[in-house]
Amino acid sequence: MDNISKSKIREIQGLLNKLGYYNYSIDGFLGNYTKNSIKNFQKNNNLKITGELDEITLNVLNDFLMGYIVYTIKDGDTLYKIAEEYNTSVWRIITANQGINPFELSIGKAIIVPLDNQIVLTNIPYTYEILENNIEALSKRYPFMKYDSIGTSVDGRNIYRIRIGEGDNHVIYNGAHHANEWITTPVLMKWLEVFLEVYSRKGSIRGYDTEEIWDYATIDIVPMVNPDGVELVIDGIENINTNKEELIKWNFDNDDFRDWKSNINGVDLNRNYDAGWEEYKKLELELGVTGPGPYLYGGSEPESEPESATMANLTRDIDTRLVLAYHSQGQVIFWNFRDLQPEISLYIGETFANASGYELAAEELSQSLAGYKDWYIQEFRKPGYTIEVGKGENPLPIEQFDMIYENNEELLLLASII
Ligand SMILES: [Zn+2]
């Protein structure tokens, strides 16, 4: 079939890989290896074996990508029977349909049947579209997860906030301020999926009781602060509608945006907060930055950009205990700003360093100006951290995902209760 985008094929390859059908390069092309794995998938799902992405096959693949189907209860159904039919488990169905009475199923009623696979793909570039699908799917599978859009990007994409927990200890975690650091988004999303699944079974992760965390903390996750920029880095200018021509110019006449960190006004969102911003503007000139570009341009005034303003507004609206801003790379945690941080910041930072194996460090002054965590520390005098995950050149290869996740799983649990 034609008209299937490269990123869609990449997503399907990523899924087939997670489901155990495909063990080759995730390249977005429908080559022979991919077609063979589609054949095996079709065989195991009682579909016509063509090796092609025909409509029916695409629909079933989509069910797995979304991780659930909507099922209408028939006469004689039991949850056990439905679970058997879709290779899933009864507890998943009960979790997704709060209040369902297994002994009194009403015929004709539509229910959510979650499939048994995990849905956050951690083996492909994590696009805005994947994020949207994953958020919707997780909220269907785990209806106690809340989400909303707290703002809109320059190009009209949603800036999502996900909320878990019901406690008084409010914390905010965010990722992908910087476009080519999009790997931070699946780190937060994978952690969220693991947490929701374990919480639905009343379990613990690394000795942390998820029910206790739920009751003690409220965790707001903004997984992708800069969705337009992420789109630009992963799939190029094709799906961007604003500043199309300027973007290429600002990118030094290059249509390869892998080095791009800014939003699509060419403003570096992590230089757009009101913490030493004027000072930064002077430094900007020394750095050779005179206007919009892939990185380091701080904008015309603090919070000039909808993305940074959205993040600042959320932070002002909530009485937070602590914030984490995820970036890549360096395996380092930055914890201070001009000695304005409270005394406990160092202790918490050391605890995070121990949990992650990352180094705790103070930034050089030039690196620590007008950033989100700088502004948070200055404004609220509370502990704020920039966590730089992974090692190498941005965008980090997705192959680093498992290591990064391993480094950060405990830190993300800890940060909600410390
Ligand atoms: Zn960054």
Image (cartoon, grey):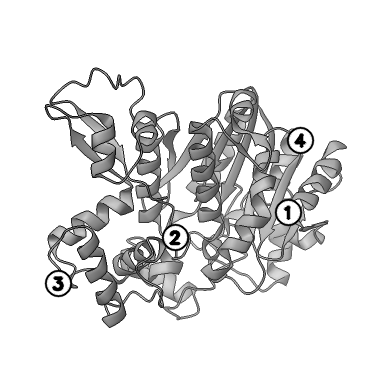
315 on left or right of 34: right
Q: Secondary structure at mark 4?
A: loop
Image coords of residue 351 (percent x, y): 81, 45
* Above or below for 149 versus 25: above
Q: Earlier in the sequence, mark 2 or mark 1?
A: 2
Q: Earlier in the sequence, mark 4 or mark 2?
A: 2
Graded by Cα atoms within 10 Å as few (under 14), some (14 to 19) or many (20 or more), the crowding at tag 3 reads some
Q: Where is mark 1, residue-wise?
A: 356
Number of other residues with Cα within 10 Å of mark 1, as a class: few under 14, some 14 to 19, many 20 or more:
many
- Identified at 70% across, 44% down, the residue is 375
Q: Which mark is residue 50?
A: 3
Residue to which mark 2 is pinned = 126
Residue 14 lies left or right of residue 353; in this view the side is left
* CA separation in Å, label 4 and label 3: 59 Å
Which residue, given by chain and number where applicable, does mark 4 sit on?
382
Residue type at mark 3? Thr
Residue in the picture at 37% in, 37% down: 141
Which of the two marks, 4 or 3, is nearer to us in this view? Answer: 3
Alpha carbons under labels 2 and 1: distance apart: 23 Å
Q: Quadrant of residue 27?
A: bottom left
Callout 1 secondary element: helix
In this rendering, which labeled residue sits more in front, label 1 or label 4?
Answer: 1
CA distance for labels 3 and 1: 46 Å
Disc 2 marks a residue whose amino acid type is: Tyr
* Residue contact at pointers 2 and 1, CB within 8 angstroms: no
Which of the two labelled residues, at mark 3 and mark 1, occupies the earlier sequence position?
A: 3
Q: Of callouts 4 and 3, which one flags the residue occurring earlier in the amino acid sequence?
A: 3
> Mark 4 touching mark 3, by CB under 8 A?
no
Which numbered disc, 3 or 2, marks the residue that appears first in the sequence?
A: 3
